[in-house]
Image: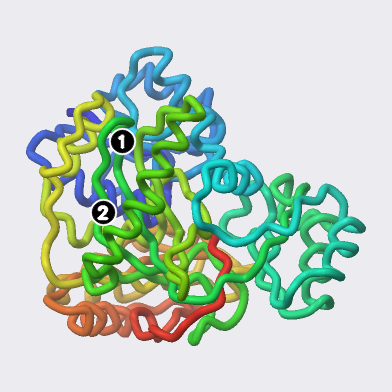
Amino acid sequence: MKILVLGGGGREHALVWKLNHSPLVEKIWCAPGNGGITSEAQCVAIEAGDLGAIVALAENTQPDLTIVGPELPLVNGLTDAFRQRNWAIVGPSKQAAQLEGSKVFSKEFLKRHGLPTAKMYGTYDAPTAVYRALSSVAWPVVIKADGLCAGKGVFLAQDFASAKDFVERVMEKNELGPGGRRILLEETLEGEELSFIILTDGKRYAPLVPTRDHKRVFDLNQGPNTGGMGAYSTDELLPEDLRQTIRSTIVEPTFDGLAADGILYQGFLYLGLMLTNSGPKVLEFNCRLGDPEAQAILARLDFDLADILNDVAKGRLDPAKLRWKPGASACVVLASGGYPGKFENGRRIDGLTAAEKISGVKILHAGTKLAGDGVVTNGGRVLGVTAAGTSLKAALASAYEAVSRIHFEGMHYRKDIGAHNTRLKAAGD
């Protein structure tokens, strides 16, 4: 098989890493890729969101299978363009991807089909309307930008002043672009977050191993939301009774709702859940593998990823073929100085070879590029230091030992990945 992977982050490096383990795979292209992927696939300098250029690339290279990593190509309708040409691709349609592309669409879907979720106060197209509505909410309140905002479109406001500041930045100063033109307000849920990701061919589905993400930039869940500062996976996150509850009250009703709305969903579906005292509730949907959840999940994979994803694209998924390594895994994200705010690129990264010598560790690149004889930073989230082990403690020890060997100017990371099991107030995204 010749495979095209779309995207250039840590999730895509993880996909390329595991696809290369398959005896079925002859060649991998990655568009645009990054400084780490270049040694494992042929990188092509085309942005994944450039639909016309990606179609032209596929016409030229004729891959047997295309795997979409990030959300933007899905929301833009790339899979529809491929399927019109009878090209095999893993990812939901443009219509289905609205579950992530529009928070309002997602919320209305949840309400329409009676899925457990936070109460919504309303949706608003103007900041003055938001300010009026804030006079009658319970604090803290969750504020969500409707569209895609790279993980920065959700804010947990403790009071009116902080809420007004966020709304001004999003709706008046346009800091998050077109994704912030519409806003919704909803109640805050309290509990523990869980990333429950499934793989489906549209008829059958298979849950992946459970993960928990760390969205806030600083230890103890302080600071602003990011795209994700780390994740871990252990089966202890999901006791069997909770798994069955999630499947019966959320997963099955979601598929029933999609069918009722005439939406065939194929690919990865990410259910961001809050485990509340009254049961699991949906915080958000994502229409692709999470990042950095993908890094933790794929570190535990014990099956042929190329074979399974080809089955998904052909509509013949066999859930029994998905097997997982016991134990646990963890991914610690190393970020540029200033992230998730302004940061500078081009900082030389040292210690990568020494870090990868640690048993069970894989350094997955995200915001990197090659420069001369080395690797430099080229994004906010730079590396995902990923490790698997017989236990969560062992996986974390290996990951943090590898982190200690890496350095670049301004590098920062959370030191409490996998350590927090306190109850959280969180909003998803």
Q: Is residue 237 above or below residue 82?
A: below
Determine whether, in the image, residue 119 is placed left or right of residue 414: right
* Location of mark 2 (residue): 208
Q: Amino acid at mark 1?
A: Trp
| Nearest to the observer: residue 404 or residue 293 | 293
Question: How many marks overall?
Answer: 2
Q: Label 1 near label 2: C-beta < 8 Å?
A: no
Residue depicted at 51% across the width and 62% down the height: 227
Q: Is residue 100 above or below residue 390?
A: above
Residue depicted at 33% across the width and 65% down the height: 211
The answer to which quarter of the image holds residue 291 is bottom left
* Location of mark 1 (residue): 29
Q: Secondary structure at mark 1?
A: strand
Q: Secondary structure at mark 2?
A: loop
Q: What is the x, y in percent for residue 168?
A: 84, 63
- Tag nearer the camera, 2 or 1: 2
Pointer 2 or 1: first along the chain? 1
Q: Amino acid at mark 2?
A: Leu
| Nearest to the observer: residue 231 or residue 323 | 323
Q: Residue furthest top?
A: 85
Q: From mark 2 to mark 1, how far is it between C-alphas? A: 25 Å
